[in-house]
Image: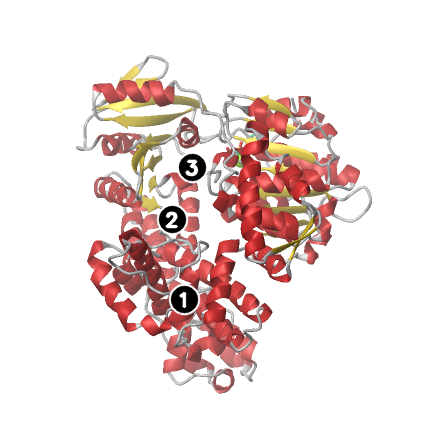
């Protein structure tokens, strides 16, 4: 079927055709035949890169232009939301039948807001968590959503993040029973069940834009799914390495999935060691520039130095320890064909459009602390394997598992290559997970009686898949907890939230966190310091990531606890009473200590050395801290602990920027992060007033500050600059001086 023949507005067709797409992919055609364009609910389950997004695009645009509807596009990750936002923006010129042009908005930040400004948009791209928080704030415009796209809906199976998506979908259906649902999924076994729950039709396909050859490598021979076998020459010791070099030499790129960060780094190192001699001089030159750009992003650390060094030789690692700026740059460079080999942890398999001619799955196992090794699911395997094959560039893609023995080769063939992906199961009925959702159901008045709460959760995927009685038991227990902790009240048959409960729901924190914070703020430590607050938030279940104390750190952490014992809001458990609990406490202490070091301006590189906290972890830690300190401040205000409000405010701002109090006025300027602010301050430019009077050359004479940044500073602080001076500013500068944002 041609795009030309679709019953969608002409202007939309033009844009799609202009983007180079004139023929529908088969899954897209099937979705159309199933009535997606006529407003039918649909689950579209088809392989990676089979064009599910475009299906959502033309359905959404028709819906908006012809029916004046409003669309919510849900994704599991911020990075994905950004990607979709870029894709949808091309429709910004489309005129609606009612007049006006299509407006595309994105909302992923701030969980304590109803974002009323979103009302103006026709398509809103959001993450599942942000949508959940908007529903808790009863954002008015959400009642008008008439089409919801749920991308990567197989996430329902994820024990941490699936339940949020499940509750969001159930709520949207509750608010507007007429809402059209378009659920996009990887291939799963129980699509029918999912369709049944959503009262939707389903389309399931195995179609892929590039043929996929799956196989298992043992020593130098790949056994393929279809029975064929291929021998590869030996040029390096390690099988995964050998295979990777083989594909690069033939002009392709490889994506290697490793089980841990450490393995990803070690694979990238090995590949880089062999690759340099294979690449052309011109390629190496452009890689060299890329390496320099990596060093210019954020603070220089041993991680960024290693990454730059490897990238200069054509390989890189990609994992959650890297900062967002680095990850984005690597993804783009891989897509452009510059970086030849990317060794990644499995998070990369998720949705981001990043195909490679070959996917190497170096280990079919994963490691989890306290759990040990376990094999990945077939679903995960399929997601990774599905990344193989670049449309328009490759005729076939290859996905290869690595076996060490004959038996393992058979096992991998049977259990992954020839296996069907599993069913997905709801993970909702876990007390810790369900607790905030029960509170928000009451607080945002989605249910006003106990029975109403049971009714709502009786319509979830969990209740559909299991016995509704099972979830009822958990809910009853949670209701009791919420009542005992004064988050809800009961009057006759009615239940409603207290002020405290209502605010906790909006603040998007676990009710247990709120209880900890409340008790801490009311009881207080004998001495209140930064450590008091930082440990308080580290103690809550919302702090993420949780840091484990390494055995070599135990003594040092124990000493730290002793030194600061008057500052803790919670009594340390006795070391001898309960070892597990004590270790947990040391872990929290480590988080508090790391955050304190951060606000005392310890460099990122020192953070890596002292706490083994990599930039990506630090970023997440800082995000959690910011959010929990904000929530604490709000609760302090509500609980009549107003003297703590300013303290929490300052600490929150310092956490966000990683600075001492004296730098706060400077880091409020755009383009000025902790590093530049410290340089300015130490050179005597301590206040906005100082900056206003400073000569421009005095600014540009400082390290890390180029003419662009100097100009940006002057624009913000005011102060007169002669026009010939502005002109002189266009001098040569390093990438570090140029960058207007100091990334974290
Ligand atoms: N009909 C088409 N013709 C040519 N290219 C297409 C067509 N439809 C989509 N594409 C392209 O295919 C690529 C993959 O599409 P998309 O990201 O929607 O995959 P997906 O099915 O959502 O996969 P994933 O499971 O990875 O999310 C995109 O680059 C898109 O532009
Ligand atoms: Mg997709």
Mark 3 or 1, closer to the camera: 1
| Quarter of the image where one finds residue 390 | top left
Above-or-below relation of 505 to 228: below
Q: Residue furthest left?
A: 237
Q: Which residue is mark 1?
A: 534
Mark 1 or 2, closer to the camera: 1
SS of the residue at dot 2? loop
State the image coordinates of residue 145 (x, y, percent, origin top left).
71, 43
Task: State which tag comes first along the sequence, 3 or 2.
Answer: 2
User: What residue do we see at 66% from left, 56% from top?
Assistant: 114
- Answer with the quadrant where ligand 1 appears in the image: top right
State the image coordinates of residue 488 (x, y, percent, origin top left).
62, 54
Looking at the image, residue 724 sits to the left or right of residue 18; the answer is left
Q: Which residue is mark 2?
A: 320
SS of the residue at dot 3? helix
Task: State which tag comes first along the sequence, 1 or 2.
Answer: 2
Front residue of this view, candidates 283 and 17:
17
Query: What distance separates the C-alpha of mark 3 from that of mark 1?
Result: 34 Å
| Residue 202 visible to the viewer | yes
Query: What distance separates the C-alpha of mark 1 from that of mark 2?
Result: 23 Å
């Amino acid at each position: 079927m041609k795009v030309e023949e679709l019953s969608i507005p002409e202007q939309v067709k033009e844009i799609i055709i202009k983007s180079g797409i004139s023929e529908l992919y088969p899954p897209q055609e099937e979705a159309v035949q199933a009535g997606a364009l006529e407003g039918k609910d649909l689950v579209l389950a088809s392989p990676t890169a089979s064009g599910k997004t475009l299906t959502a695009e033309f359905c959404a645009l028709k819906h908006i232009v012809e029916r004046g509807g409003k669309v919510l596009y849900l994704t599991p990750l911020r990075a994905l939301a950004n990607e979709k936002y870029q894709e949808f923006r091309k429709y910004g010129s489309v005129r609606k039948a009612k007049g006006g042009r299509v407006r595309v908005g994105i909302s992923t930040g701030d969980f304590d807001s109803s974002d009323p400004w979103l009302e103006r948009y026709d398509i809103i791209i959001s993450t599942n968590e942000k949508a959940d928080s908007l529903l808790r704030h009863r954002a008015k415009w959400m009642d008008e959503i008439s089409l919801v796209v749920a991308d990567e809906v197989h996430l329902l199976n994820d024990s941490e993040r699936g339940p949020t998506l499940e509750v969001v979908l159930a709520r949207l259906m509750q608010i507007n029973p007429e809402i059209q649902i378009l659920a996009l999924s990887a291939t799963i076994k129980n699509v029918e069940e999912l369709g049944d729950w959503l009262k939707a039709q389903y389309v399931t396909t195995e179609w892929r834009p590039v043929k996929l050859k799956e196989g298992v490598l043992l020593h130098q021979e790949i056994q393929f799914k279809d029975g064929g076998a291929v021998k590869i020459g030996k040029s390096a010791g390690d099988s995964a390495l050998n295979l990777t070099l083989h594909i690069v030499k033939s002009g392709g790129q490889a994506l290697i999935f490793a089980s841990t960060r450490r393995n990803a780094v070690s694979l990238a190192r090995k590949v880089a060691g062999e690759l340099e001699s294979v690449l052309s001089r011109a390629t190496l030159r452009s890689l060299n520039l890329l390496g320099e750009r990596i060093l210019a992003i954020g603070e220089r650390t041993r991680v960024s130095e290693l990454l730059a060094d490897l990238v200069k030789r054509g390989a890189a690692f990609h994992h959650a320890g890297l900062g967002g700026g680095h990850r984005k740059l690597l993804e783009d460079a891989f897509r452009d064909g510059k970086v030849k080999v990317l060794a990644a942890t499995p998070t990369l398999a998720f949705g981001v459009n990043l195909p490679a001619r070959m996917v190497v799955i170096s280990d079919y196992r994963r490691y989890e602390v306290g759990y040990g090794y376990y094999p990945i699911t077939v679903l995960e395997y399929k997601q990774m394997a599905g990344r193989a094959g670049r449309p328009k560039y490759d005729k076939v893609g290859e996905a290869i598992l690595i076996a060490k023995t004959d038996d393992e080769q058979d096992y991998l063939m049977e259990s992954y290559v020839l296996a069907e992906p599993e069913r997905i199961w709801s993970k909702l009925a876990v007390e810790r997970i369900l607790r905030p959702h029960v509170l928000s159901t009451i607080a945002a008045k989605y249910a006003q009686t106990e029975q109403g709460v049971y009714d709502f959760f009786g319509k979830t995927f969990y209740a559909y898949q299991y016995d509704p009685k099972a979830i009822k038991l958990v809910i009853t227990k949670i209701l009791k907890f919420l009542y005992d902790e004064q988050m809800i009240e009961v009057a006759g048959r009615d239940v409603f939230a207290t002020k405290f409960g209502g605010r906790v729901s909006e603040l998007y924190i676990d009710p247990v966190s709120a209880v900890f914070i409340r008790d801490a703020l009311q009881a207080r430590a004998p001495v209140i310091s930064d450590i008091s607050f930082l440990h308080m938030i580290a103690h809550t279940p919302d702090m993420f990531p949780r840091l484990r104390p390494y055995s070599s750190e135990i003594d040092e952490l124990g000493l730290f606890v002793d030194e600061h014992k008057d500052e803790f809001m919670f009594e340390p458990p006795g070391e001898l009473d309960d070892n597990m609990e004590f270790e947990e406490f040391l872990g929290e202490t480590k988080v508090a200590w790391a955050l304190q070091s951060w606000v005392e301006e310890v460099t990122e590189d020192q953070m890596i050395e002292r706490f083994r906290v990599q930039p990506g972890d630090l970023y997440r830690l800082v995000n959690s801290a910011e959010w929990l300190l904000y929530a604490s401040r709000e609760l302090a205000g509500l609980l009549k602990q107003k003297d703590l409000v300013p303290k929490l405010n300052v600490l929150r701002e310092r956490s966000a920027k990683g600075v001492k109090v004296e730098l706060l006025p400077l880091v409020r300027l755009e383009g000025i992060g902790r590093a530049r602010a410290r340089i300015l301050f130490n050179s005597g430019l301590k206040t906005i007033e100082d900056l206003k009077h400073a000569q421009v050359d005095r600014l540009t004479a400082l390290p890390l500050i180029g003419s662009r940044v100097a100009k940006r500073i002057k624009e913000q602080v005011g102060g007169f600059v002669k026009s010939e001076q502005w002109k002189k500013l266009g001098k040569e500068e390093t990438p570090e001086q140029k960058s207007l944002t100091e990334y974290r």
